[in-house]
Amino acid sequence: MRQHRSLNEKARLARSGDLSFSPLPFALSSPPLTMSSTIPINHYDPTAPTPQNTPLTHAPIAAGLSRPTVPDIDEDAEPDDEDEEDEAGAVQQAMLGLVHGKLSGLVGKSSGYVESLPVEVKKNVEALKGVQVKQVALQNQYKRECLELEKKYLELQKPLYERRQAIITGAAPPTAEEIEAGEAQSTKDDPDYTPLPKDVEPASTGIPEFWLTALRTHVGFSEIITDRDADALKSLRDIQIEYLPTTEKKPGFKLRFFFDKNDFFENTELEKTYLYQEEVGYSGDFMYDHAIGTEIKWKEDKDLTKEFEVKKQRNKNTNRTRLVRKARPTASFFNFFNPPQPPSDDDSSEIDDDDLEELEERLEIDYQLGEDLKEKIIPRAIDFFTGKALEYEDFEDDDDFDDLEDDDDEDFDDDDSDSDAEPPARRRGPPKGRGAGAIAGSNPEECKQQ
């Protein structure tokens, strides 16, 4: 009877690294990310070779792997089908671990192609870089002119924004022509729309809670507007946008929130200014630099960005007690006017990686909210008020995600904490990066056809 090595033994050897593994003959050009186990190792990529993915010696990945041989075994020693599948799966996982371990050390490394070019060809390469410098300069000029075009059309729309604000606040009644045009659009959007009766006059009070409703319809703002905020936002009468003058060193825009007198703060106007970097980013879009918000003058005990709690303290010497009132930060829409600030290069090296990642998320979310106000909510406020805008929002479908099931619950112990409250999930922002070009689906300064 021929001797054989069990699958369990091979799995053990694979995990311990005793199985032979030949180094790969070339470098990969993938970005420095951890490779997923779903990547087909032997998948053929028909794309044209580049300096990063062109090997100096051609050979498929499979050629770099030594195939372990399995001697024949007699039928009596064969394991059950179910056990064999489990053991085969263990071998496969172990081998994948070895492959990924080898590949992760090669990702992003140069194949040596560019470095191996003769000096005469390298001069041509440098010349192309010089040509690209001029292209980037034209791209900067293009984006600046697009910004000026946006300013021009904003000025043309201002009378319409003023008319909208007058109808919302009840300062002026809508005309029959405006109502007729609106009903025509409603019929176009919904063939089953029922026209309003002609003998009813428009309300003289305008539209109550218009901007509160519009903001709550937006997915991002709905997550940060609390019930306490809603009471203050009922006094919000208008939101306007204006671009920074050309004389400013950095381009950008300003959001202006106008409030009626209310019980929460003294300000009748709150502002939020977003500044771009002077040069466009690698993607060709303006890069977000930082934001500046208005300081809110809260009335006594009305600060919505803080929660107050009263604690009883006892003096150790006199045994007398006193009540101490302490404030702590809390979630609020009005934190929008106290934006996070990007760290300096020196500070970045001192910040913990997790804290830095969280700060980047907050910056991205803050920037995206500002861009959505500028590009969506202010121009299409009535669509957010009615909910029509949600038809055009790109929501992630639950069907795109698979549930991760783990039947090995017995390996974990239940938390015996006295608190039943689950910690709030941290809201994920867009892909990393502080620029407009780094945020998925956002192209805020794209020159639009008017």
Image: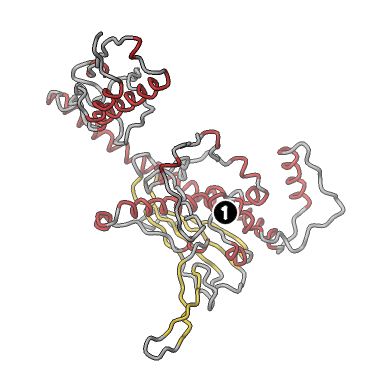
For the point 85% across and 49% down, the residue is 197
Look at the numbered disc 1 and give the secondary structure of its residue. helix
Left or right: where does residue 155 sit relative to residue 136?
right
Residue identified by numbered label 1: 222
Q: Nearer the viewer, residue 89 or 133?
A: 89
Q: Residue furthest bottom?
A: 318
For the C terminus, give its image quadrant.
top right
Q: Residues within 10 Å of mark 1 (few under 14, many from 20)?
A: some
Q: Nearer the viewer, residue 56 or 124?
A: 56
The vertical placement of 169 against 178, above or below, is below
Question: Which quarter of the figure has residue 135?
Answer: top left
Give percent across and percent down for residue 125.
Answer: 21, 28
Q: Residue furthest left?
A: 119
Give percent across and percent down for residue 44.
Answer: 34, 17
Left or right: where does residue 415 sit relative to residue 194?
left
Question: Which quarter of the figure has residue 216?
Answer: bottom right
Colouring convention used in this rendered image of the protein: secondary structure
The vertical placement of 171 against 281, above or below, is below
The amino acid beneath tag 1 is Ser
Q: Residue furthest right?
A: 199
